Amino acid sequence: MAENGFERLSDAVLAALVLALEQKDLAVAELLSRALEMAMTRGAGGKGFVERREFTAGVEKAMNQMDALRKQSRS
């Protein structure tokens, strides 16, 4: 385990995304969401690659919260 307590970059990005969502900072959450996607899929595949990993419950919850924040910001 790394000194910061995270095993993977995606773990640290997810923690930051959750914090941005708690603070209702949609702009930062959008950027972190993209960074999370990149961290989870980098080095994977090539031509014809199909992602087979499933999101963890934490990632799924964060994505649901982001969808709700997007809808709230449009109102």
Image (spheres, grey):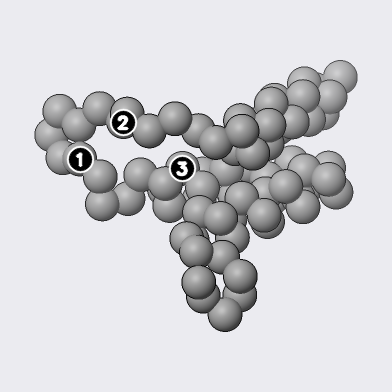
Query: How many numbered marks does the figure carry?
Result: 3
Please determine whether, in this image, residue 7 is positioned above or below residue 63.
below
The residue at the point 42 percent across, 46 percent down is: 40
Give the residue type that dot 3 points to: Glu
Rendered image: mark on residue 45: 1
User: Which residue position is annotated with label 3?
Assistant: 37
The residue at the point 72 percent across, 47 percent down is: 18
Q: Position of residue 53 (x, y in %)?
A: 38, 33
Give the residue type that dot 1 points to: Gly
Q: Badge 1: few (under 14), some or many (20 or more) residues near its Cα, within 10 Å?
A: few
* Distance between mark 1 and mark 3 Cα atoms: 14 Å
Q: Tag 2's secondary structure?
A: loop
Q: Tag 1's secondary structure?
A: loop
Rendered image: mark on residue 51: 2
- Work out whether residue 70 or residue 74 is closer to the camera in this orientation and state it: 70
Q: Position of residue 56 (x, y in %)?
A: 55, 36
